[in-house]
């Protein structure tokens, strides 16, 4: 009795397994087909990626090479442009020099023609040039002597005013400017780098500036051709500010 039951159960299990196999076989085949298709697409996609990567590398290399060539071309263009500008500048200068030389030659020819028309000889022309140079030198010497004379006159006038009109302000040249080169705070005087050659006179007053601001005012007490000594005027001294070397002095 047990054996038929076991046989029946085995057959039932076998039938169930067969039924399940028959049911799942199409799905397995479908899965295998889908898997194969996916593998094929993946393979194609990977191949496409490899091609795209290779093309991208090739394009990048080509771009870098093109940029390198472009940079070289720009550099060469810059050099050529600079050379062209240099040549144009030289050409312009040569043209100007040629025009001046031509003008000078024409002027010389005209001047020579005028001298020839007067019947003068080259020796006469040289004598006139020598005389002209001597006259110009004498004129320059007289001008220099006049300047010295005027300075001496101004100095004498300032000294005279010191006794006759001590309160009169001594005029100094407009635009007179110099610098403080030494300071003696104990005796309250300074040394300046300008003197009689610049028109400085005794008792003349100068303003001391630093960075565009008034620091003090000084009065000249002694003058040499290239320097001067001045006392600091207490009534013009700005509180908290001391005169220092390098400060500017102005009239």
Image (cartoon, rainbow, N blue to C red):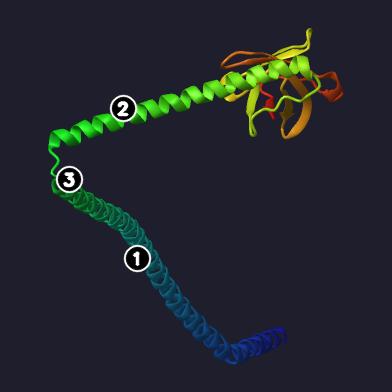
The residue singled out by tag 1 in the image is 62
Relative depth, front residue between 79 and 65: 79
Residue 140 occupies quadrant: top left
Q: Quadrant of the C terminus?
A: top right
x then y, percent, for residue 145: 48, 22
Quarter of the view holding residue 18 = bottom right
Say the numbered circle drawn on residue 134.
Answer: 2
- Residue 56 at what x, y percent from top left? 41, 68
Q: Position of residue 104 (x, y in %)?
A: 23, 49
**Which one is earlier in the sequence, the residue at label 1 or at label 2?**
1
Decide if residue 113 is on the left or right side of residue 82.
left
In screen coordinates, is 82 left or right of 178? left
Q: Badge 2: few (under 14), some or many (20 or more) residues near its Cα, within 10 Å?
A: few
* Label located before the other in sequence (3 or 2): 3
Note whether residue 195 is visible. no
- Report the Cα–Cα distance between label 1 and label 3: 78 Å
3D distance between C-alphas at marks 3 and 2: 21 Å
What residue is shown at x 50% (from left), y 86% (from top)? 33
Count of marks placed on residues: 3
């Amino acid at each position: 009795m047990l054996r038929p039951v076991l046989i029946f159960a085995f057959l039932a299990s076998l039938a169930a397994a067969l039924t399940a196999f028959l049911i799942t076989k199409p799905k397995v085949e479908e899965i295998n087909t889908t898997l194969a298709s996916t593998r094929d697409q993946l393979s194609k996609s990977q191949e496409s990626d490899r091609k795209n990567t290779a093309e991208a590398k090739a394009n990048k290399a080509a771009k870098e090479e093109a940029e390198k060539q472009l940079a070289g071309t720009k550099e060469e263009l810059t050099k050529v442009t600079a050379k062209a500008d240099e040549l144009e500048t030289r050409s312009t200068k040569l043209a100007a020099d040629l025009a001046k030389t031509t003008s000078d030659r024409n002027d010389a020819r005209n001047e020579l023609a005028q001298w020839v028309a007067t019947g003068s000889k080259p020796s006469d022309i040289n004598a006139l040039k020598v005389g002209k140079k001597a006259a110009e030198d004498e004129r320059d010497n007289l001008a220099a002597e006049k300047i010295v004379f005027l300075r001496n006159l101004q100095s004498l006038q300032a000294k005279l005013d010191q006794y006759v009109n001590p309160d009169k302000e001594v005029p100094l040249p407009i635009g007179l400017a110099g610098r403080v080169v030494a300071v003696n705070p104990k005796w309250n005087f300074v040394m300046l780098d300008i003197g009689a050659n610049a028109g400085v006179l005794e008792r003349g007053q100068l303003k001391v500036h630093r960075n565009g601001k008034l620091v003090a005012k000084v009065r000249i007490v002694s003058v040499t051709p290239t320097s001067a000594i001045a006392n600091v005027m207490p009534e013009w001294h700005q509180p908290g500010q001391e005169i220092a070397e390098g400060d500017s002095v102005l009239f």
